Amino acid sequence: MKKFILALDQGTTSSRAILFDHKGRIQSVAQKEFTQIFPQPGWVEHDPNEIWSSQAAVATEAVVRAGADGRNIAAIGITNQRETTIVWDRETGEPIYNAIVWQDRRTAAFCEQLKQQGLAETIRSKTGLVIDAYFSGSKIRWILDHISGARRRAEEGKLAFGTVDSWLVWKFTRGRVHATDISNAGRTMLFNIREQQWDEELLQIIGIPKSMLPEVKQSSEIYGETENSLFANKIPIAGIAGDQHAALFGQMCLDKAMVKNTYGTGCFMLMNIGDHFIESKNNLLTTVAWKINGKIQYAFEGSIFIAGAVVQWLRDGLGIIRTAAEIEVLALKVEDTGGVYFVPAFAGLGAPYWNPDARGTMVGITRGTIAAHIARAAVESIAYQTRDVLKAMEADAGMPIKELRVDGGATANNLLMQFQADLLNCKVIRPEITETTALGAAYLAGLATGFWESVESIQQLWKSEREFVPGVGEPAMKEKIAGWERAVHAAQVWSRK
């Protein structure tokens, strides 16, 4: 009987399921969007039961589409939107509040208090993270403080916390397994990634009872088996990683100084830094990449808030293109930007600047500026921001990078990919399979169950679809980079009140 790995990719706006065969090829895909809830400005929530029902529905659909059934599934791998926080009743399995999404900012004031108490260095040295509402810890506290009786019930051991991976495992196993993997645990602001355990001091600082927390496992091991009517037979759940960690693994960035960049609404860049924790001196996060066969790998992470979203803005806000794909055609109508620079700081600047007050800025406009110049400047802004993060990574790691592996929707834009290679003066490699997040989860599950023999056998499956090689000399790019740096400076000066 032909066997497959079922990868569940539970994202911020949709739940997806992809079936992979033994050669790492996609056999079927199913996807379902779910409701985004905005109770107040800056608040973002999801219904945990809708997350579960949508994920269960696409899992079944993907299997049926491939003409398979549960007996064909060797294992399930899960990858998920990180930091999103769910608290549920251990007895009934019902959430006590909606999931608070990673984008949610309601706990920003509490995080500011922690900074004022001088806790930034304590938290960074233990977790590799900056104090921010982005991470799960402060979200759990908010639920305990705002839902009637929640803190008392938590202290009595009656409530469970989990990120989305934990919630799905709990539902699949009908409450038999309450676990997470180390890559997700490391994004809570409660987990000591040096000692690889929940940190008593951090739990006390943020006010979280330890009894709520899931057991932390490796990224590739059998956590439990499905125990519900989704499939007639029991299937091992055997791989878990947060979405960016799964993409790093799916891109086979297994060695030190290997880097991947995911070009989505924003950009997430991760660099494998090996088996030792290194604290960033350049405003990057240090995170656990994964843990397999008892061996841990760490990574630097840099987030760019606005990447593909700038193209959406040109389409929906300015109306100068009708589809996202049109931006490349429009940008190619001119040889360069005509001196125009566009800093798309619509939601502030992410790494390595971390300036939440900066706003979108366009400079260098003349009477001769046309829509094509603006389109080209928008495309180039994605590459410039990527370079800023990469240079911070090189400085922290103390070594240059030789290639950048890329995935995500915007990698279809050949103009962007070529400009990226020119700007970085290194190869930019687009793989054959760009569904690297789901692929990473599949690999982790397949390794734990013997579907794939070893990491080395998986490495053989990774193939490049196209390599973009630098075609412009470094001196020619220096002037452009200097212009970009002036533009970023202008965006930050403008934000000062």
Image (cartoon, rainbow, N blue to C red):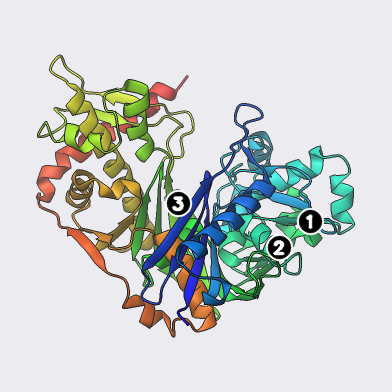
Distance from the alpha carbon under mark 2 to that under mark 1: 8 Å
Q: Secondary structure at mark 3?
A: loop
Where residue 224 sits: x, y (%)? 67, 74
State the residue at coordinates (59%, 60%): 184
Q: Residues within 10 Å of mark 3 (few under 14, many from 20)?
A: many
* Residue at numbered disc 3: 284
Q: Nearer the viewer, mark 3 or mark 2?
A: 2
Which label's residue is closer to the chain start, 3 or 2? 2
* Residue at numbered disc 2: 170
- Left or right, 237 with reference to 154: left
* Residue at numbered disc 1: 93
Q: Secondary structure at mark 2?
A: helix
Where residue 485 sits: x, y (%)? 27, 36
Where residue 240 sits: x, y (%)? 56, 66
User: Is 93 drawn above or below residue 293 in the view shown?
Assistant: above
In-front residue for pair 122/300: 300
Q: Nearer the viewer, mark 1 or mark 3?
A: 1
**Mark 2 residue type:** Trp
- Left or right, 402 with reference to 445: left
**Marks 2,1: beta carbons within 8 A:** yes
Q: Which mark is residue 259?
A: none
